[in-house]
Image (cartoon, rainbow, N blue to C red):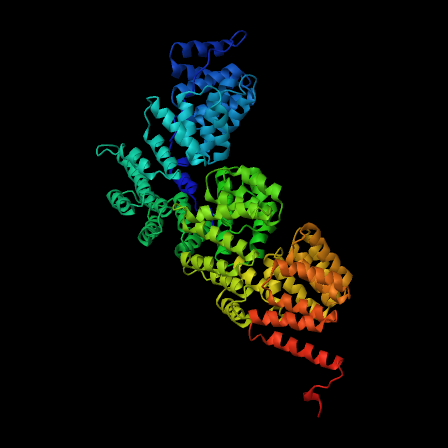
Amino acid sequence: MNWYRRTLGLCLGLNLLTATPLMLAQPALAQLPNLENQPALVQEGYVLFERGWIAPALETFRQAVQQYPNSVPAQLGLARSYLKLGQDANAFEAFRRLLVLEPTNIEALETLGVLGTYRPEWRSVGIESLTTLLAQPGYEQNGEVRSQRALLLFYEGRLVEAVADYDIALEQNPTWATQVGAAQVFAYGGRSAQSVELFESYINAGQRLTVFEAQAYSFALRRQDNPGQAIAVLTAFLDANGDPTEQAQIKADLATSYAANREYEQGLALLDTIQGQPLVVARALRGMTFYTDTPVVQQRAIAAYKAVLSSSSLTVGTAREAAAALGSYPSSQPTTLATYRQLAAQYPDDVSLYVQTSIWERQLAQISAQELRQRLLAVNLPENPIQLRYVASSLARLDPPDAELITFYQEVLAVTAAEPFLHYRLGQIYLQQNQLDLAQEQLQLYAGDDPAVLLFQAEQARRQDDIDTSIAIYQQLINDPTSNNEVVTGALQGLAGIYQGQGRYAEALALYEEIIALNPGNDAKILGQTSLAYQGKFIAVETAESVLNQWLASHSANDTPPELYSLVGSLPADPARSQLYDTLLAINPRSIAVRQRQIQVLAMTDPDAANQAAAQLVADNPDAPEAYLLQGQIAQDTDDLSTAAAAYNTLLERNPEQFDAIVGLAGVRFRQLRYQEARRLYDQAIELAPDDINLRQASISLTVAQDRPLQALEEISALQSRVPNSIGLERQELLIQERLLLHRGFQPVWERY
């Protein structure tokens, strides 16, 4: 499931990279430096500066810097003069030079922190300068400096860090500017409830919202499922005589709010009035698709972004944005890949385009998982922060995340914090590996009101055997009217998995009917449904294999969704599928189910090797019950009963009610002629699964082995009343009757001649 299609991505496209939604601070000049013992030329420059003769002062300071290149006052005067004359670029470089001479110069650190808001390429320097400033004595708890750094972090898309800075700034008797800035960042940083509280406090105090602030407020209101108020907030800013660009953005946000309020027709009508702003319209349509699955909205969004890509004035940044947006819709994903390929060919030195292209080639099954790993693990990450952001965001799209790339995830996170969702992906990997503490750490680094967090928590609860909590979370997401198809699909699949584990296959299959209805055209879901139906004994093995064969015949070998692993792992081991097992395990060597089938096939020809492989599987997956079950089964089949018993006992020590381990150990004790233990175990298993016919037949066989044929016949008779016309039971009854006759000295009539 692809959780990268969240509203934060739209927010980044709208505001963080292009606009200035927060109030910008202005550089403030400090007092004159101590000019005692300074050269006459430096003193002359400050005299001119103080008199307001800035141009002559600038020329004087230039000469002073040339003659005295290590003079801090001369460099400071030059930087101040550039700033006073509005030559921001020269001022920026002059203040950077000043930091070389004096790395902790307070005025330079403060000014660079403010100038960082002026141009995107200056932001990283501004953040670095303010970070140094906050480390100086007396500045550690400075709320204004924290707010300024939070603003820059916000622009850089580093929302988690921006939120953290505002948390501290709000504790320091914040100004109204700090409060409203925090409200905006919290809106886009996953703290919408707190954002709404801050905005309401700000408004109730008589403060007026700017357009940018109103947009953030409406965004937070939508996230809090209050689109009606979001509409009211934005409507107040509509002005027929207002700035056309600003009004277009208001209408775009208003259209999204209408969609959230289930009034998408009004939203579309509003967008019809701003067709001269194609990119704004495209972004708005994409935002609307987060709240409505109406085909017309999605179709218009796709058409709008394709029109943007065909524009003669298309920039690289806009092309990348359009490609990413189109990637949210399956029908337009080939266009996404084609766009990235074209950009990568035009800009071969841009590593991020190479990464984006590679990941999309994998997502569209045009390269194998191994090929993607080889490419990414050979990449030298760029130093450019914008390229790093693209690398991180494209890696976050890889769904499910590849555990074999865990070092690459960690490397990317070590050099950029621009993509918090990457923490979620890394957490998913840890969750798959049952490293729950590490998974929780990563989830905490990705904080917010994204439904993906709830899905993560539900799976985490399931792995901690807190099934009730897991079910409650899934039901909450399924019943929430604001949940989109992806969220509902994820919740339905999670709930179906729980029902499957409980043996409630009919209920799980009913959920899969809903999943398939929500995902028309996604035939991978058919594989998942088939796997469930086969495991629940609703279809024969031949039917399940037919579905698998149809998939393999119609899909690329690189197309390996999780549902394929589920079906292949549920079907009996088959030597004819040996190559398929090898292929799937090369892509995902951690698939225990497929590895089980591979080992079972190996056991048919080389039992010793199979036992060794099973032991290695246990060593590699010490927390996986299925690994021990396989080891027990292989050992049991090859008459290594002591190893089988040890494997089953390990599971029962962890969970005395592990059904398969109870049945397996019962079978071992039966073969070891330890009938009393076997009887106790079979009775325990029957209590757990009273309707399991195979189990009851095994129990009847034990009764016979204990030389109680009449009791065995009574058990068969009782079972036949519940399962009439069972050929297996009839045959078992006939064999017991034969044995009983022979014990009495009679020869059956069918053996007399």
Vertical comparison of 645 with 697: above or below: above
Left or right for 722, reference 732 = left
Q: Residue at 43%, 31% (x, y): give it.
A: 194
User: As rendered, which of 740 and 38 lies closer to the eye?
Assistant: 740
Any part of residue 685 in sight:
yes
Work out which residue is located at the far top of the displayed protein and give it. 36
Vertical comparison of 42 with 518: above or below: above
Q: Position of residue 500 (x, y in %)?
A: 54, 57
User: As rendered, which of 238 and 682 lies closer to the eye?
Assistant: 682
Q: Residue at 32%, 40% (x, y): give it.
A: 257
Q: Position of residue 623 (x, y in %)?
A: 66, 50
- Badge count: 0
Left or right for 523, reference 640 = left
User: As rendered, which of 239 and 691 lies closer to the eye?
Assistant: 691
Vertical comparison of 110 with 453: above or below: above
Left or right for 563, reference 686 = left
Any part of residue 348 in sight:
no
Vertical comparison of 544 with 73: above or below: below
Q: Position of residue 289 (x, y in %)?
A: 36, 48
Residue 283 found in image quarter? top left
Q: Quadrant of the C terminus?
A: bottom right
Q: Position of residue 641 (x, y in %)?
A: 76, 63
Work out which residue is located at the far bottom of the displayed protein and give it. 753
